[in-house]
Each structure stands twice: as structure tokens, then as C-alpha cells.
Amino acid sequence: MAKRSAVRTSTPVVQDSSAVERVIGYIISGIRDGRFAPGQRLIEGELQAMLQVSRGPVREAVRRLAAENILQLELHKGARLRQLTPEEINAIYDVREVLEGLAARLAAQNASFPDDQLQALEREFDRRFDGTTRHYLAYNEEFHRLIVRSSGNTELIRLVENLQIPTFLLLLHILVDALSIKRARAEHRPIVKAILKRDGREAERTMRAHIRSTKTFVIKVAAKRFRTG
């Protein structure tokens, strides 16, 4: 009786999802706080050592972030943090203007909008602002997040949150200065006023004007700092 040959079946490799998410989180937080700069190369070995993970989760994390256009893969060179072009910056802010304008209008019309949270955020910033860019950016992110989430529209919230990382790819922490903070704060006040008055139309108008103003500033400064123009 002939022996049957053993049949080998290939089993797909399943990555440790928690390790992959940890690597992704580390890279994203590095973008947010400025540890990673546009064009900077990410070294797999350094990520492995820093996070105490194997090569597989690092490569899977890099693959996912490349698929989201956050990282750029280069043959024989690994991954680099993408540097946005002026055209990409313009497109992102055009979309933000529409989405966040709508969010502001819906927030103003939402009877359950947490007025006290918005007012508390503004008072806290005025009272405790230490003059640093990092402090301002943390406040600014919370300001926009609070308004978007208070729109009550889950799909809108998802779309806006997906635009946050490309925005941080601009490394706003080195683009923002005292004058731009003063300008942005002045533009925030009418937005807050319109929302608290439940004036959806005015809330949308002032938010859209604020996003357009920010876009003009970012494109001008990014082109100069990153030589993208």
C-alpha cells in the first residue's frame, strides 16, 4: 500500500492587533507632538526597540499608515512621514470648511449642546494660557472637537476626525506663532457667540470664515518653512 504524502497547508500569519495598534498610536502621537517631522525616515529597528515589539507588527503598522497616505514607502529605504503639497493642503482645508461649517450650524441647532462645556473651555484657556504653542494647539483641537461632536451627526464626526492627522502632518506646532494665536482666538469668539445664541446660520458662516483664514495662513507659512511652494 503506497504511503500518502503529507499535505502541507499554509496558514496565514495573524499579527498581534494590540501590538500593531500600539505602533500606530506611537507614530500618530509623534506626529501630533512634533517628534516626527515631514520627510523624516522611520527606522523599523528603532520602533521595535522603543515599543518592545517584533518586526511583524511594525511592518503592519507602517503598511496601514502608508495606505492612509500618512507614510510614504520608498524602495530599499523604508518609510518616511509624508510632506503635504500646497494642493493637498488646499484640498484638506476646503473639505474642513464645508464639514466644520455644517458642524457648527448643527451644534447651534442642537438643543442638547453642552453650553457650559464650551464656555468652560474658553474661560479655562483665557485663565491658564501659558503662551506656548503646545498649550494653544491642545485647546484648539478640543475647541473644534467639542463643536463637531456636539453636532450630533455621527457620520460628520467620523469624516472630520479622519482629517485631523493630515492636518497634523503640517506640523502646526512650528507654524503657529503668537500673532496667529491672537488671530485664531479673535475668530473663535464670534463662533462661540453664534452657537450660544442658537444662530445656526451665523455659526456656520463664522466657522467657515475661520477655516478659510487658517488655510490662507497655513499655505503661506508651510510653503516658506517646508519649501513646498
Image (cartoon, grey):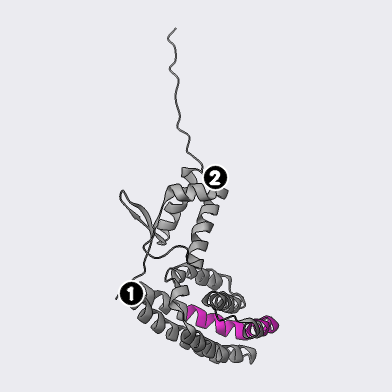
Q: Main secondary structure of the magenta part?
A: helix
Which residue is label 1 attached to? 87
Crowding at label 1, few (<14), some or many (≥20) Cα neighbours within 10 Å?
few
Q: Locate residue 218: give its quadrant.
A: bottom left
Read off the residue under disc 2: 16
Q: Residue furthest top?
A: 1
Q: Is residue 59 visible?
A: no
What amino acid is found at the position of numbered circle 1 in the picture?
Answer: Glu
Residue appearing at x 60%, y 74% in the figure: 149
- Quarter of the picture holding the C terminus: bottom left
Say which of 165 and 147 sits in front.
165
Q: Which mark is residue 54?
A: none
SS at mark 2 in the image: loop
In depth, the one of 10 and 16 nearer the eye is: 16
Q: Decide whether residue 110 is among the magenta residues.
A: yes
102 vs 206: above or below: above
Q: Is residue 43 above or below residue 87?
A: above
